[in-house]
Amino acid sequence: MTTNRQWILKRRPTGVPADADFELIESPVPEPGDGEFVTRNLVLSVDPAQRGWMDKGGNYFPPIPLGAAVSAGVIGEVISSRNPDYPVGDRLYAIGSWSEYSLLGAGFVFRKLPADNTIPLAKYNSLLGGMGCSALIALRDIGKPKAGETLFISGAAGNMGTLAGQIGRIYGCHVVGSAGSDEKCRYLEDVLGFDATLNYRTAGDLSAAVRQACPEGIDIYYDNVGGPMLEAVLDNINMRARIVMNGSIAEYNDTEPRPGPRNLWNLLVKRAFIEGFLLPDFADRIDDALVQLEDWYRAGKIDAREDIRTDFTRMPAIFRALFDGSNKGKLMVSLE
Ligand SMILES: NC(=O)c1ccc[n+]([C@@H]2O[C@H](COP(=O)([O-])OP(=O)(O)OC[C@H]3O[C@@H](n4cnc5c(N)ncnc54)[C@H](OP(=O)(O)O)[C@@H]3O)[C@@H](O)[C@H]2O)c1
């Protein structure tokens, strides 16, 4: 192969990203310089955070320059290398882009994949990579779960939500989740063993619905969505509650700043706190977290559901699934 197809950002999206914000272009497969290597990408991750990278202000990453390939997590196999630490044949999980091939340096690599191939490749994106580490470290080290406490999770049927819920159950929490369909709620209760769920799209008064689902109040909130659900949860927190701000997907496509929660005062009343989580701040805990997650996975205590698409020519439409809720698990595109 000499041609590299890649999705570039053509225009900054306003609201939900449109097809016309992106373009599929072809260029030669890159050649590695000193210290660099090239991967043939096998899996491209599709993540809510990429929406912020498309804005002119970026988020915790700088913005993607217009005309540049859309940055993304990738699982790839090294096909040419001028870095002895990453020889041809190595498979790794790295920050690349929505491209068939990526030119990388060591600083882009999150982890190498083991050579033994006993775990499906997609698991290294959904569970045994940055996503799993984030769910575990954020819940364990900020949420500080104790057996018997009530853990409430929004976006509960998504990748981060299902992982946080299973980890909460391992810690002995009473786990309650919100999701956008009855089918997702049934999955959480029947398959993952959540103690209760609510469908936020049909619940009506969210604060009352949270109270009904969590009659003992909420000790830990693992927040994936922000928006109105945060206010509803703040109405229902217990003394010394911990709120882990993991994401705010309900707000990523906002075109106007939205009013903040009207009840932040309740943090003082309940001596509670909110803390934002980002994995690089906990880099020294990643190796142990990966070992823990793999142990739990092999023992059948945790798993991730993957939503693997194959049509690389439809990346913008696939990305939109995150925002209309039609993804069922960790969204990614396989190029194998
Ligand atoms: N801090 C970190 O290190 C970190 C790492 C990874 C991800 N995250 C964050 O975690 C969250 C979940 O990410 P994920 O990769 O696991 O995606 P995901 O939950 O698998 O997919 C996104 C889900 O968000 C829900 N959603 C979309 N718009 C919504 C809205 N307006 N209100 C409520 N829910 C909405 C949809 O489910 P419904 O059908 O339930 O609406 C959709 O399926 C995101 O906020 C993401 O930015 C943070």
Image (tube, rainbow, N blue to C red):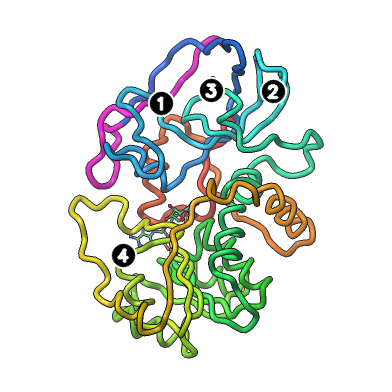
* Magenta span of residues: 1-21
Query: Is residue 246 among the parts visible in the rendering?
Result: yes
Q: Which residue position is annotated with label 4?
A: 227
Q: Which residue position is annotated with label 1?
A: 69
Magenta stretch: includes residue 14:
yes
Quadrant placement of the N terminus:
top right
Of marks 2 and 3, the one in the foreground: 2
Which quadrant of the view contains residue 26? top left
Q: Is residue 81 above or below residue 213?
A: above
Ligand 1 shows up in the quarter that is bottom left
Which x, y percent locates residue 149? 58, 82
Q: Which residue position is annotated with label 3?
A: 102
Which x, y percent locates residue 274? 42, 68
- Amino acid type, label 1: Ala
Q: Residue at x 63, y 66 (%)?
A: 167
Marks 4 and 3 in Cβ contact (< 8 Å): no
Spatial CA span between label 4 and label 3: 35 Å
Q: Regarding mark 1 in the picture, which secondary structure is present there? A: loop
Marks 4 and 2 in Cβ contact (< 8 Å): no
Q: Which mark is residue 86?
A: 2
- Amino acid type, label 3: Ser
Spatial CA span between label 4 and label 2: 42 Å
- Amino acid type, label 4: Gly
Which x, y percent locates residue 159? 53, 56
